Image (cartoon, rainbow, N blue to C red):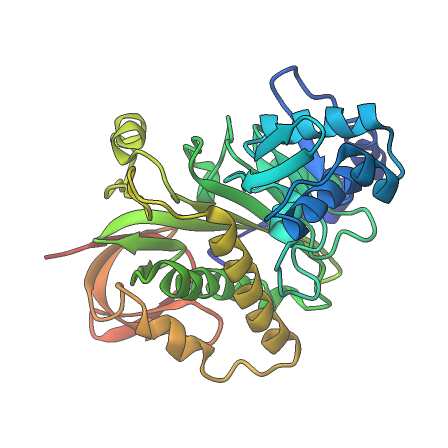
Amino acid sequence: MSYLVKMIPLKKTSENYLKSKTSNVNLSSKQHMYTSFDDIPDKIIRLLKSHQSEFISGEYIGRSLGLSRAAVWKNIKKLQSLGYKIRSKQKFGYRLIAKTNLMLPWEISDGLQTETIGRKIYYFNTIDSTQNFALKISSKPHENGTIIISERQTHGRGRQNKKWVSPSGGIWLSVILKPNFEISQASLFPMLASLALCVAIEKVLNLKPKLKWPNDLTLDDKKVAGILVDASIESNQIDYLIIGVGINFKIQPSKITKIVKSSENFYGVTTLVGKKEESRPVLLLQTFLYEFEQLYDKLVANKLHGIKNEWEKRSSTIGKNVSISSPNGEIKGRVLGIDDDGALLVSSKGRTQRLQVGDISYQI
């Protein structure tokens, strides 16, 4: 069992339970779900984007999509409520002035360059945990590559069931994968996901985050993102993996700090984008999904050469004197690197120890 992966025995996951939980999703009056197969909003937005320099009539939209004028008006109002700036003008119709900043499925799909990951999307404005929802649907067919994303989580969780505060302004998502791998390869996925996110942040935001073993991304030595993996296995084979990703995209660090500052091993919280900065989360999300799929494809093809080096190059942990709380007690030593499956190599008391689980504190 890897330090980063929580194993869920397949026999404990009832198919009937999963069906009952997803066949009729009950949403509160304040909770809304949209999917990548809600095609009417998608088609209307695509039409408006393709005619962004001019007005298009409700009659034209209706005729193009097989909708009544009333249905067009109703959907335009819905899109406006989701943050799209759409101007309406009598006798002229509608014109898109500005896109939304929400991570809606059709916005994610527009320009997404992946083949599998992110091609099916469940979006929530609020959810208890994207990871929990993913667990409910992960055993169903045709969910490989599905992502679940929410603007806010009320009960987000991190590694070892620690609380993960997930306010509006962050990117909170889970990715379902169904790889045909043995359990021993499960520990590679957090390494791939954290490296992909690091590269995406570099490309989109021109920042240089660091990777803190085992699953954190940091800026200025403060946490800015984290990775969580749940896995279900059967006969030593991975049935499915759920990669949970929490990104402090544009949050207020002080508010989170007040909530979690007393937590064990807390070392600070920061944000990728400042309060007055402008940046769309969708572009970072699309880039991350693309980079992750590229690394995943390399793993499938058993072409992992160089990935470990790329992770180590971005690590803030390697070369540091550390104290590690592990299941076998506290270990102090100097970090030498990671091995091919992501385990930490530590020089301690004259010998090299290989650690798969633990919480790290850096020593001065």
Q: Furthest-front residue in view? A: 91
Q: Who's the residue at 60% across and 75% down the image?
A: 299
257 displayed left or right of 58: left
Which image quarter is the C terminus in? Answer: bottom left
Which image quarter is the N terminus in? Answer: bottom right
Residue 233, image x, y percentages = 70, 55
Residue 313, image x, y percentages = 32, 74
Q: Who's the residue at 37% across and 53% down the image?
A: 216
| Residue closer to the observer: 64 or 54 | 54
Whether residue 231 can be seen here: no
Tally the marks. Answer: 0
Q: Who's the residue at 49% across and 71% down the image?
A: 341
296 displayed left or right of 195: right
Residue 4, image x, y percentages = 48, 55
Q: Quadrant of residue 262?
A: top left
Q: Who's the residue at 47% across and 64% down the image?
A: 196
